[in-house]
Image (cartoon, grey):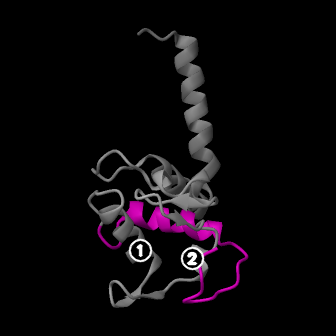
Amino acid sequence: MKFSKKAALFSAVLLSASLSAHAGDPLQSAIQDGKQAFSHETFGGKGKTCDACHSNDGVGPGKLPNGKAIPSLSNAAAIFPRFNPKAKKVVTLEDQIRACVKNALQGTPPEAGNEKLTNIAAYITSLSQGKPIDMGGKPE
């Protein structure tokens, strides 16, 4: 497929505008990168992404692969850290993301401190903006 010089220039301008839109705000850039990963990253699993279970970019109610209904992620960051009875320990939001990647997506979880993990956590945290902190509270 051949692109004209005009199309190539237009694409370069769009890319430049997109990059500069977040260049001054690293947090917004991380949130947008996290949203992108939430929607597209399979972590080497079986083709599923986070939004396979967490519909509507995580703000709507979702369903597990077994059909069980799950709440939205709209207050997820406000209720972590929390005790996970299955794991028998207190887990952070990042721990939960890694567990979802391993179990639901059947992928390879990113290591703690990994930029992609941080960005997904930033995106999910952005969904909780303005929600009261309620560690151990119920998902909404």
User: Where is the N terminus found, in terms of image quarters?
Assistant: top left
Q: Is residue 74 left or right of residue 35?
A: right
Q: Amino acid at mark 1?
A: Gln
Q: Residue furthest front?
A: 67
Q: Quadrant of residue 110?
A: bottom left
The picture places residue 75, in percent across and down from the top left corner, at: 63, 74
The correct choice, above or below, for 13 with respect to 71 in the image is above
For the point 35% across and 84% down, which residue is it?
86
* Front-most of residues 83 and 123: 83
Q: Which badge, 1 or 2, comes first in the chain's sequence?
A: 2
Residue range of the region highlighted in magenta in the rendering: 111-140
- What is the quadrant of the C terminus in the image? bottom right
Local secondary structure at mark 1: helix
Question: Does the rendering let one see residue 90?
Answer: yes
Q: In the shown orientation, is residue 133 left or right of residue 85?
A: right
Name the disc covering residue 75, or none. Answer: none
Q: For this view, does 104 lie left or right of residue 131?
A: left
- Alpha-carbon neighbours of circle 1 within 10 Å: few (<14), some, or many (≥20)? some
**Is residue 15 placed above or below 95 in the rendered structure?**
above
Q: Spatial distance from mark 1 to mark 2, Cα to Cα?
A: 11 Å
Q: Nearer the viewer, residue 10 or 49?
A: 49
Residue 33: where, in percent of width, then height? 51, 53
Identified at 62% across, 57% down, the residue is 24
Residue 28 point in image, percent of width and height: 61, 59
Residue type at the position of mark 2: Ala
Q: How many marks?
A: 2
| Residue assigned mark 2 | 77
Query: Which residue occupies 41% across, 68% down?
Result: 97
Residue wearing tag 1: 96
Residue 92 in the image: state x and y as whole percent. Answer: 44, 82
